[in-house]
Image (tube, grey):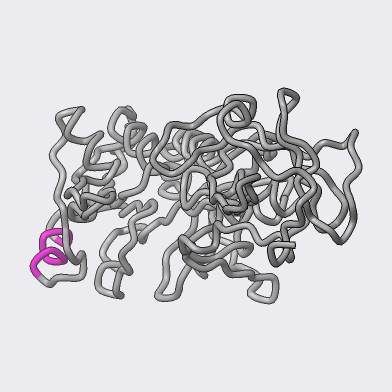
Amino acid sequence: MLDKVRVYFMGAGEVAVPILLRLANSDIIELCGIATQVDKEAGRKKVLTATPVAKIADLMGMSIEKVPSVNDPEFVAKLAAMDLDFIVVVSFGQFLKKEILELPRYRCINIHTSILPKYRGASPIISTLLNRDHYAGVSFMEMDLSMDTGAIYQCIEIPVEADDTALSLENRLGQMAANHVDRVLLDIKTGHLTPTLQDNSKATYCSKIKKQMGLIDWAKHESKDIEAMVRAFTPWPNASVILPMKNGKMLQVTVNRCRIDKEKSGIKGNPQVLGADKNGIFISCLDGGVIEILELTIPGKKMMKANEFVNGYHLAVGKGLIDNE
């Protein structure tokens, strides 16, 4: 009988949660320990908040270590004493130095949410949606000293759905990775999976997302860009627009859901509010395409449907959206 696969898990983000749960409940895995990031300040009130991995571990009664630096010599020595087959890393946010990478018998495995070498870096799911890709995926990768450049054991793809947001796509990718993780680790251990080097000439990179990237620029973004931004930036940093009001003021709102209305035609080169009534909010964009805003949020208020918004707020229909025309 084959010995269980000895695994130490390092993760922090939401996508790591189903993968951790699969490892913890698999008959072929011996979960030797869990590490996550230390609690960090979150929200306007800067409340110390545990990572999603820490929260689920606490809920399930699993022991977890909140590690400021996994490269600390004392922590490295602790890992070395565990006789590990693998260290599995998912959405962790810390670089692992050579001493850790060489500890496990079968190396450190990173589960990255893109089809490598495409979208190396910090925001692969958001980049997939911003670029309107038809497919997303996860890569089971052997870690090395550079970011997301290691040899690939397996990539698994799924189609991107028309209504996918970053949140829904992350949830689906996390669950898909969880469904395969114990089998992949076992196949690596038994020699049924061998790594393939990435083609570095095909590599693309995605940077960390900043809050200001969510602001829609009517003079720059076309209708397809806006629809993609709304989906990609949900739940963070959210896509926001500045709209003209009848009283002459400008109102910045978060667009939570929208669609391209293919039955309406806008005014190419002159973005403006086409309509705002019981039928909805319709925006003519730079390319002449029309965006229908379905749900939105005013700062400090709850999300509302478009018809609820127009009942209390009056947009300046026909007013240009570039340079306050």
Give the residue drawn at x 85%, y 56%: 287
The correct choice, above or below, for 116 with respect to 135 in the image is: below
The correct choice, above or below, for 208 with respect to 189 in the image is: below
| Horizontal side, residue 36 vs residue 192: left or right | left
The correct choice, above or below, for 163 with respect to 94 in the image is: above
Give how far across and how far down residue 307 sits, in percent. Answer: 64, 25
Res 219 → quadrant: bottom right
Residue 165 appears in the rendering: yes
Give the residue drawn at x 18%, y 52%: 39
- Viewer-proximal residue among 165 and 248: 248
Give how far across and how far down residue 281 sits, in percent. Answer: 71, 35
| Horizontal side, residue 65 vs residue 287: left or right | left
| Horizontal side, residue 47 vs residue 213: left or right | left
| Horizontal side, residue 43 vs residue 266: left or right | left
Give how far across and how far down residue 98 sits, in percent. Answer: 30, 75
**Which secondary structure is most common in the magenta stretch?**
helix
Give the residue drawn at x 42%, y 43%: 15
In the image, farthest residue toward the left: 74
Give how far across and how far down residue 193 sits, in percent. Answer: 53, 50
Q: Quadrant of the N terminus?
A: top left
Residue 154 appears in the rendering: no
Give the residue drawn at x 51%, y 68%: 207
The stretch in magenta equals: 74-80
Q: Is residue 78 magenta?
A: yes
- Viewer-proximal residue among 276 and 266: 276
Q: Quadrant of the C terminus?
A: bottom right
The correct choice, above or below, for 113 with respect to 269 in the image is: above
- Viewer-proximal residue among 321 and 314: 314
